[in-house]
Amino acid sequence: VFATGEPVVNVDVHGVTLGSTEVDTIVLSAGAGGLLVNASQVVQGGSVTAYNNNQARVRVVSALTGAGDRNSVTVNGTPIVVNAPSPAISAYTLVNAGSAAIPGTVTGTQALAAGSATTLMVLGPAAVPTLAVIADDNRVPTSTTGVKLRLVNAMDPTTMAAYPLTMALDYSAVASNVTPGAQSAYALLPSTTTSILEVSSALQAATMYSPTNGLNTLTLSAQSVYTVFMF
């Protein structure tokens, strides 16, 4: 199964049996990450067979702070980024779900749920990098006019831990107290074409991001999911 406009196999099922004279319905249900799906085969007047997705999607945010620092991350033998500069956000890569070994600039093991989407952030100095794991929910809002918006703090945890971030849309806070390596909850908001987005910290006088940084108004399209990364 493919989604329109997405070069990704949403679910790949083998061994489906279609019996003679059967009437079969394939039912798709979204995984936690929003793009990968699970399938069920429903035989009219008969059995229901589940075909669960066994893959996950992973991307990497490179946020090393040193000039010229490069980042490489592999998940269960699949390279996600190789020698990537910072700051940078990779595309998603399909990997097998389950316990994932993560060697590279940082090392570790991470459980990747089937159907999930995960962002691995590599933060701070290359000599002592930090791995932060962010769960992504790319399922669109149920409202036909709504959007989802969140803030992810990709700043250096060794120097910016005392400066949690607040994000405001049209001068109303939609995320607060987001520390390095963390994310806010998704705010459910109405779509807009003229909003002003600001990111600041109560512990620092200067606004970290504001329209004077080059963006006067912001468009948030209906049925979309947005993430603001602060490096």
Image (cartoon, grey):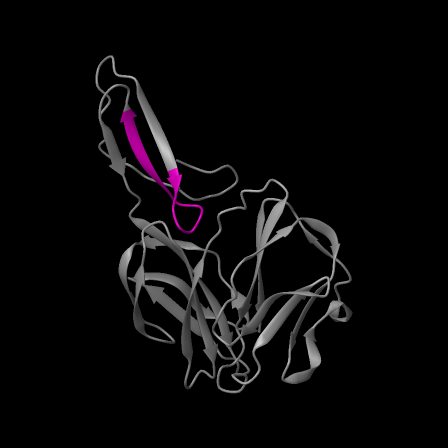
- Residue lying at the far front of the rendered structure: 172
Q: For the C terminus, which image quadrant?
A: bottom right
Which percent across, then down, holds residue 53? 31, 44
Residue drawn at x 25%, y 16% as measured from the top left: 22
Residue 136 relative to residue 112: left or right:
right
Residue 207 relative to residue 1: left or right:
right
Q: Which residues are magenta?
A: 29-42
Indicate yes or no whether the magenta region holds residue 36.
yes
Residue drawn at x 58%, y 48% as measured from the top left: 224
Q: For the N terminus, which image quadrant?
A: top left
Please tell me which residue lies in front, 121 or 40: 40
Residue 197 relative to residue 7: left or right:
right
Indicate yes or no whether the magenta region holds residue 20.
no
Which percent across, then down, holds residue 24? 30, 22
* Numbered circles on residues, count: 0
Residue 111 relative to residue 156: left or right:
left
Which percent across, then down, holds residue 85? 51, 72
Please tell me which residue lies in front, 92 or 41: 41
Residue drawn at x 22%, y 22% as measured from the top left: 46
Picture quadrant where residue 205 is located: bottom right
Please tell me which residue lies in front, 154 or 150: 150
